Amino acid sequence: MANITASMVKELRERTSAGMMDCKKALAATDGNMDEAVTWLRERGIAKAVKKEGAVAAEGLCSFAIKGNKCVLFELNSQTDFVAQNAKFTDLIANVGEILVNSDATCTECALKVESNGKNLETIILEASGVIGEKISLRRVTVLEKNDNQVFGAYKHMGGRIASVVLVDGTDEVVAKDVAMHIAALAPKYVSKDDIPADVIEKEREVILAAALNENATSAKPKPENIIAERIVPGRLDKNLKEICLLSQAFVKNPDQTVEAYVKGAKCNVVSFVRLEVGEGIEKQETDFAAEVAAQSAAFN
């Protein structure tokens, strides 16, 4: 039997993107023959996803798993929305959530190394990619922890296209879920103005000032620049900042009151929140179907 070295495992891993343990098993089963090991992996669906390596996985679902005082919120991407609704994919989502909430992982990189039934999560996802036939990837993992005097509010929209979790001081789970639903709908960026970084506020101030000066330059009755800078800009800035802060937003279920008023009325307080939306920040590939068909036809001629 051939001596399976670390460099051999590394080479096979680079060629197939399979997990290290699967690569070691493949090499052992094929007496160290690299090409046969690739075939061994492909036959078992483990390396099938390699052909999809260049594809963009910008669809999928976001989900969460809660156990005791811990909540894990994550995004699992696929290439198409159709596959994201596949039972195998939704089963994988549930499995990933269970594995993560029972682990110590706090980020995506460490999450992929978590072991379950003799395989790490990276391998589990890769094997699922082979079975499902699309590139699947774990993109984002966030962990929230609470104490016994706090509650989680969790909400998924459109089956997981958007998922949000809020941590609330208090014991009213209905209020917490209402706030999570609001977060999913209105996508605030911060809890309150106190949480906005100074450089973000300054950048917004500069944008508003430039816009106000441009308006003033074309106005029939221009105002002195100091009036714009000292009176108009602060008002607009305050309005814009309120719109991106959770507590100052009009509550989605009752626009006559703010989220802050709703929460305080229930003697609760928002500590933090996380909101994920599938594909945020991913540049999706635009497929020219006619060009694709023409290219395939040319390949057979």
Image: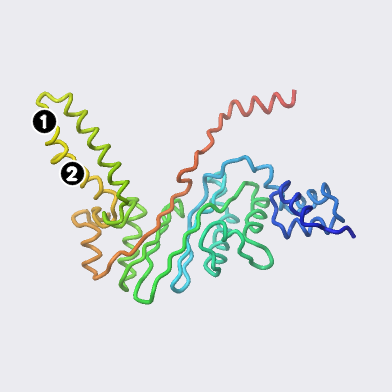
* 164 to the left or right of 219: right
Q: Secondary structure at mark 1?
A: loop
Is 110 situated above or below 10? below
Q: Amino acid at mark 2?
A: Pro
Q: Which residue is mark 2?
A: 234
Q: Give the color scheme: rainbow, by chain, secondary structure or one colour.
A: rainbow
Q: Nearer the viewer, residue 267 or 82?
A: 267
**Residue 84 at what x, y percent from top left?**
54, 50
Badge 1 amino acid: Lys
Residue at the outermost left position: 221
Residue 180 in the image: x percent, y percent? 35, 60
Q: To which quarter of the image does residue 19 belong?
A: bottom right
The mark nearer the N terminus, 2 or 1, is 1
Residue visible at 18% across and 40% down in the picture: 233
Query: Which residue position is annotated with label 1?
Result: 223
Residue contact between numbered discs 2 and 1, judged by CB atoms under 8 Å: no
As helix, strand or loop, the secondary structure at mark 2 comes to helix
Q: Position of residue 288 (x, y in %)?
A: 56, 29
Dot 2, crowdedness within 10 Å: few (<14), some or many (≥20)?
A: some
How far is mark 2 from mark 1, CA to CA? 15 Å
